[in-house]
Image (spheres, grey):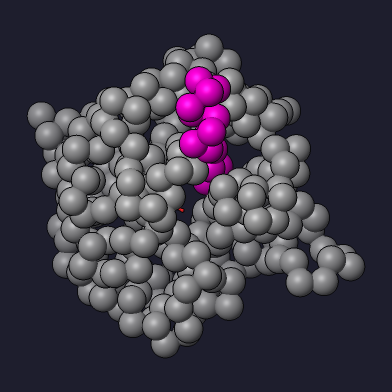
Amino acid sequence: MKKFLIAGNWKMNNTLNMSEELFSAINIAVSNINENDLANIEIVVCPNFVNIYHIVLKASGIPVYVGAQNCYTEIKGAFTGEISATMLKSVGCKYCIVGHSERRTIFKESNEFINKKVKVLIENDINPILCIGETIEERKSSNTFSVLKSQLDNCLKDISTDDLPKIVIAYEPVWAIGTGISATTKEIAEAHNWLRHYLIANYGEIIANKIYILYGGSLTENNADETFSIENVNGGLIGGASLVADKFLSIIHTAIAKSKENDL
Ligand code: PGA
């Protein structure tokens, strides 16, 4: 049985009205989906910080969870402009994206810094969605797997085997994010197989098989079917297409169909 997690990363988009409108459309459509169809699907939306609480309130009673796009490593104090895991917890966030390539590149976040965020999120009962992925230069120089290994070794440092299933891994090749050029089926399969084996080697098969490994990078309603058919792909982290309700819903329906195929 294959389980899927479909997460929308809204990035720095949408005023409050726009977020509410987008979420209303998702809410109405998801509320109409049969409960059994959603048995193996988890849906998450990640609005910007100022819209989060409004969306959490609107999501109450429907099977859509709300996540943040970032958090700081400390719980409170003199860190002007930052948001802590306890604050996210207090407004009802269940997930938080960490290590997104935009934060690694634009805000110079290191694996060690991301590791601190993973830990503080787990301590506060929020599931980290840990993004990893290689740049085009790293891929061209055949360094994809050494980059993924170093990102995982360092971002998951000192995370206990018991806590590991709380973490979602999102494989997002940097060159595929927002470019309209998704990785090929072969590239995704290779990376996801490698990731599953890494998890098995480090944490054992039972734990490793509980971990969602998402694909992200120009995932749309057009390539979701092919992507979700790949072994070891347990859903997606979706940027651009998650800002259009119909596209995001189409991806959700593809995941439902795939979870049923795998159920047979
Ligand atoms: P994209 O973004 O779907 O727009 O490529 C994915 C992401 O950044 O998580």
Residue 218: give x, y in percent of width and height: 34, 50
Residue 55 in sight from this viewpoint: yes
Residue 73: give x, y in percent of width and height: 76, 52
In magenta stretch: residue 139: yes
Q: Residue at x 41, y 78 (%)?
A: 19
In the rendered structure, the answer to whether residue 19 lies left or right of residue 228 reads right
In magenta stretch: residue 118: no
Ligand 1 quadrant assignment: bottom left
Residue 198: give x, y in percent of width and height: 51, 18
Q: Give the quarter of the figure containing the C terminus.
A: top left
Between 30 and 252, the one lying in front of the other is 252
Q: Which span is picked out in magenta?
A: 128-143
- Residue 48 higher or lower than 162, as above or below: below
Residue 221: give x, y in percent of width and height: 21, 54
Outermost right residue: 78
Between 153 and 264, the one lying in front of the other is 153
Q: Give the quarter of the figure containing the N terminus.
A: top left
- Residue 57 higher or lower than 39, as above or below: below
Q: Residue at x 64, y 25 (%)?
A: 150
In the rendered structure, the answer to whether residue 200 lies left or right of residue 25 reads right
In the rendered structure, the answer to whether residue 256 lies left or right of residue 88 reads left
Q: Residue at x 44, y 19 (%)?
A: 194
Between 141 and 46, the one lying in front of the other is 141
Residue 167 in sight from this viewpoint: no
Quarter occupied by residue 72? bottom right
- Residue 113 higher or lower than 49, as above or below: above
